[in-house]
Image (cartoon, helix red, strand yellow):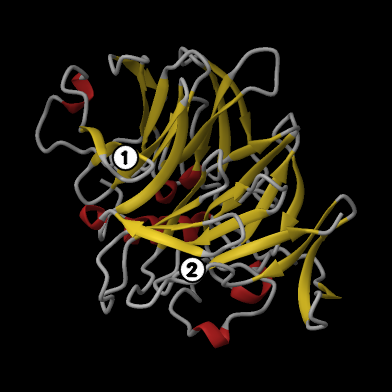
Amino acid sequence: MTTRRQFLAQSTLALGAAAAGPTLLRAADKAGSRLPVTGSGAHTYEVVHDWLLPPAGLVWGDTHGLAQDANGFIYVAHTVGKSSMRPDAVAVYDAQGKFVRTFGSEYRGGAHGLDIRREGNTEYLYHCDTNRSCTVKTTLAGEIVWTKFYPTEDPAYAAAPINYIPTNCAFAPDGSYFVADGYGSHRILRYDANNRFLGEIGQPGPNPTEGVEAADGLLRSPHGLCVDTRGAQPVVVVADRSHQRVQVFSLDGKHLRTVKDTEKLRLPCHFDVKGDLMLCPDLDSQVCLMDRDWRVIAQLGDGKANNGRYGSRRSQRRDQFTPGEFICPHDAIFLHNGDILVAEWLPIGRLTLLRKLS
C-alpha cells in the first residue's frame, strides 16, 4: 500500500524544478478592499481565501472533498481537527456561503472523496472513507443507503492482506459508476447501476522511485476520476497522480489516450466539468483548467515558485500563506454560477473561492 506519507516522498523525487507561477494582479471588491487575482483573459478570477469557515465548535482537518447539489447547497468533507468539539466530517453551506448544518461523525479521520449523483428525481452523496476502506452512499441529509467495501469477486483482492482504500467516485450516463482505489491497489473498479461488479480499468504501475517509465494503462495513485461527456462518446478520465499524468479510457476499460505535461500538469488530483472546460486541482500548488482535448489552458493560483518542494508549506500558520497562491489543492468544483471552489489538503484546512471576473 502506498500511504500518503510514502506518496510525498515518491512524488518529490519525480517532480522537476519549480516553474514560475502566473503574475497575480490586484482588484477591488465591493467593499473597496483589495484581493489577489489569478488567471488572464476569459479565465480571470478573484481569489477569496477562507470563503467557507467552520461553525463554532468545529475545527477543520484536512479539507478533502467538495460537492454542490441542484439547489445550490455546498458539501465539504474534511477529516476533523483533533481539537474540534464537533465530530462531524461533512459541513453544509448555502450557495452564498452561509453555514447550514453538519453531519457524518462516522467519517471523522477518513473523509476523503465526496461526489454527488442524481438518480431519477433524487440526489445522493457518495463518500469515500479512507479509514474504514469503504464507499458510502447517503441521502443529502446523511442517511446511509448502503456501505460498500472491496469487491470480493475480484481476484485482485483475493489474497490477504486486502489492499483497498477508495479515494473518489465517478458516474456514467447509463447509471454505472466507477470507484478509484487510489491509495490501495492502484486500479479503477467498475459497477453497473445495480451495484454489480463489472471489472477493472487499469493495472498497478511502477513506483516513481523505481525510475521506470510507466506504460499506458498502468496506474499509480489513481486518485481522482470523472466521466467526461463533452465528446461524441463518454470516457473515463483518470488522474494518474504519482505518474504525473492523465489517462483516458472507454467506459469498458480500453485505454484511449495519455496526457502528460509535467510543466503544466504536475500532480493531478480530481476533475469537474462545466461546458467545454475541465477543472483539475493539482496537489502541487495549482488549479488547472483544461480544454476538450485535456490540454492545460490556465494555471490558477500557482504557488510552485514560492512553495518550493511540494508540500513543504503544509504545516505553516495561516498568516504565513502567500495570498492568491495555493499550496495543496485536493479537490475543486465549478459552482452553478461559474465560480470555482477549492479545497486544500492542509492540516488546518482551507476553502478558497475563485470568483470569476471575465
Helix, strand or loop for disc 1: loop
Q: Residue at x 13, y 24 (%)?
A: 158
Number of the label disc, if any, that sits on residue 242: none
Q: Count all numbered tags in the image, as a single digit.
A: 2
Name the spot of residue 54 as percent of width and height, x first.
43, 71
Residue 126 shown left or right of residue 236 in the figure: left
| Left or right position of 148 against 137 | left
Q: Residues within 10 Å of mark 1 (few under 14, many from 20)?
A: many
266 versus 316 height, above or below: above
Residue at figure coordinates x 40%, y 26% from the top left? 178
In this rendering, the answer to whether 276 lies above or below 93 is: above
Q: Where is residue 106 in the image (x, y as percent from the top left)?
A: 21, 53
The answer to which quarter of the image holds residue 355 is: bottom right
Residue 186 visible to an observer of this rendering = yes
* Circle 2 crowding by C-alpha within 10 Å: few under 14, some 14–19, many from 20: some
Residue under label 1: 166
Who's the residue at 49% across and 39% down the image? 240
In the picture provided, is 94 more to the left or to the right than 306? left
Q: CB of mark 1 within 8 Å of CB of mark 2?
A: no
The three-letter amino acid code for the residue at tag 1 is Pro
Quadrant that contains the N terminus: top left
Q: Mark 2 points at which residue?
A: 311
Q: Nearer the viewer, residue 205 or 4?
A: 4
